[in-house]
Image (cartoon, grey):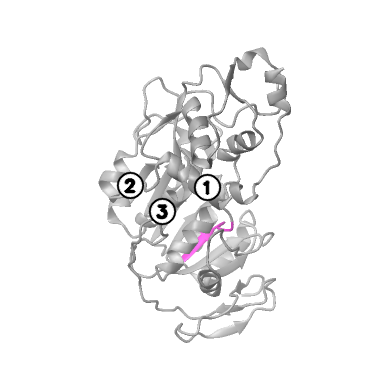
């Protein structure tokens, strides 16, 4: 098994006995499991908490998992008693304490999470490392191309389920909305790699499930979605919005998405199925700006509408959303899976603000240079 290693920060006193092997190659100075472990499942459902009842305990691999979606997904899976391994390049810490997470909960999570360091584009390594360890389920959170998935399938011929994070961006632009899972797709979209991955999974005959989020928001979001509005609201600036501001879009909270990912685990109704996942309601661009202000406790903002064709922004983006109507039906996930989003838009934005931007943390510094061009 030379060339790869698992790392585990510590072991909880109440865990079953393990066979432990020193992990000399691990940057995290942990240990590697060499035997499978039986965990006792938990079935807790407090409102707002990251607990979801899933299938029996599994040996799960998450491709990615150290930021945003994977951070919340991995916590639910660990709480459910699954043995969870994150496959990453090791360039960022395997775990991080979440805003509002108690020291006890974080220590418990960190003691159970495992790490496999490697580059998923090193196909030989992927095949050798995954086949040596074996996994029941793969969650592919960061896959962008079909050729990155094939080595995983080759390495795990007995895989029980491959759960993929796709995107609603695969749908062909249409005048008829919302998008349904049966709608036409765009093979030339910037998400064509995700579409090709879904096609590959189906052709291989594996048990696969694909989730297609629309816009995702929430604490630790690395895309400037709500953060873009929060920066302008905090600075007391007008918010420039393209066109009429009546373009309709849709946002889904990351915690609701994470719960949907667990809802499909071991679920026969999710076999070889695609599900749109997002918020319950749609919102206009103007409405989103006002919702961000309400959620964060700012006064109602001044909205300035402009025609993007009147400006040359170069490579800079003037607005963080597609300048079009863009939203999808989540009825299939609600009816087949029994899943439903827990966060309404204002409540979800408040959760994001209070646990992230409102604490002074954000991914990108404010840049108002494009705004100044519009407002001049």
* Residue 291 marker: none
Where residue 77 appears, as percent x and y from the top left, is: 44, 64
Residue picked out by circle 1: 352
Q: Which residue is mark 2?
A: 340
Q: Nearer the viewer, residue 146 or 77?
A: 77
Give residue 16's position: percent from left, percent from top: 44, 84
Please say whether residue 88 is visible from this viewpoint. yes
Residue projecting furthest to the left: 335
Label 3 or label 2, whichever comes before in sequence order: 3
Q: Quadrant of residue 375?
A: top right
- Label 3 sits on a secondary structure element that is helix
- Residue 361 location, x and y as percent? 64, 50
Q: Secondary structure at mark 1?
A: helix
Residue drawn at the location 62% of the way across and 72% of the way down: 5
Q: Position of residue 353 (x, y in %)?
A: 55, 46
Closer-to-camera residue (296/333): 296
Q: Residues within 10 Å of mark 2 (few under 14, many from 20)?
A: some
Label 3 with label 1: CB-CB less than 8 Å: no
Instruction: Tell me the mark number nearer the camera, choosing from 1 and 2.
Output: 1
Q: CA distance from mark 1 to mark 2?
A: 19 Å
Image: magenta residue range: 60-66
């Amino acid at each position: 098994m030379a060339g790869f290693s698992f790392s585990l920060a510590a072991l909880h006193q109440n865990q079953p006995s393990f066979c432990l092997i020193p992990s000399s190659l691990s940057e995290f100075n942990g240990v590697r499991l060499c035997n499978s472990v039986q965990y006792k499942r938990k079935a807790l459902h407090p409102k707002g908490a990251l607990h979801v009842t899933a299938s029996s305990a599994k040996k799960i691999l998450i491709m990615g998992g150290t930021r945003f979606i994977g951070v919340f997904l991995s916590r639910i899976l660990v709480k459910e008693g699954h043995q969870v391994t994150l496959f990453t390049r090791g360039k960022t810490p395997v775990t991080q304490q979440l805003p509002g997470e108690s020291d006890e909960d974080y220590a418990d999570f960190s003691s159970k999470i495992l790490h496999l360091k490697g580059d998923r584009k090193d196909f030989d390594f992927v095949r050798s490392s995954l086949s040596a360890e074996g996994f029941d389920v793969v969650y592919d959170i960061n896959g962008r191309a079909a050729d990155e998935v094939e080595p995983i399938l080759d390495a795990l011929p007995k895989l029980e389920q491959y759960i993929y994070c796709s995107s609603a961006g695969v749908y062909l632009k249409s005048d008829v909305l919302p998008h349904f899972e049966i709608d036409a797709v765009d093979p030339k979209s910037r998400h064509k790699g995700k579409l090709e991955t879904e096609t590959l999974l189906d052709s291989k005959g594996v048990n696969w499930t694909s989730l297609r989020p629309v816009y995702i928001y929430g604490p630790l979001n690395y895309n400037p979605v709500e953060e873009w509005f929060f920066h302008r609201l905090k600075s007391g600036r007008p918010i420039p919005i393209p066109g009429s501001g009546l373009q309709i879009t849709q946002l889904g909270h990351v915690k609701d998405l994470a719960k949907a990912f667990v809802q499909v685990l071991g679920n026969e109704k999710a076999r070889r199925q695609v599900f749109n996942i997002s918020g319950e309601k749609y919102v206009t661009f103007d409405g989103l700006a006002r919702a961000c202000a309400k959620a964060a406790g700012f006064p109602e903002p001044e909205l300035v509408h402009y025609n993007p064709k009147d400006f040359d922004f170069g490579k800079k983006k003037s607005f963080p959303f597609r300048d079009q109507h863009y939203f999808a039906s989540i009825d299939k996930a609600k009816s087949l899976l029994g899943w439903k989003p827990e966060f309404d838009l204002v409540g979800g934005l408040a959760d994001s603000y209070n646990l992230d931007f409102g604490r002074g943390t954000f991914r990108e510094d404010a840049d108002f240079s494009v705004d100044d061009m519009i407002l001049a």
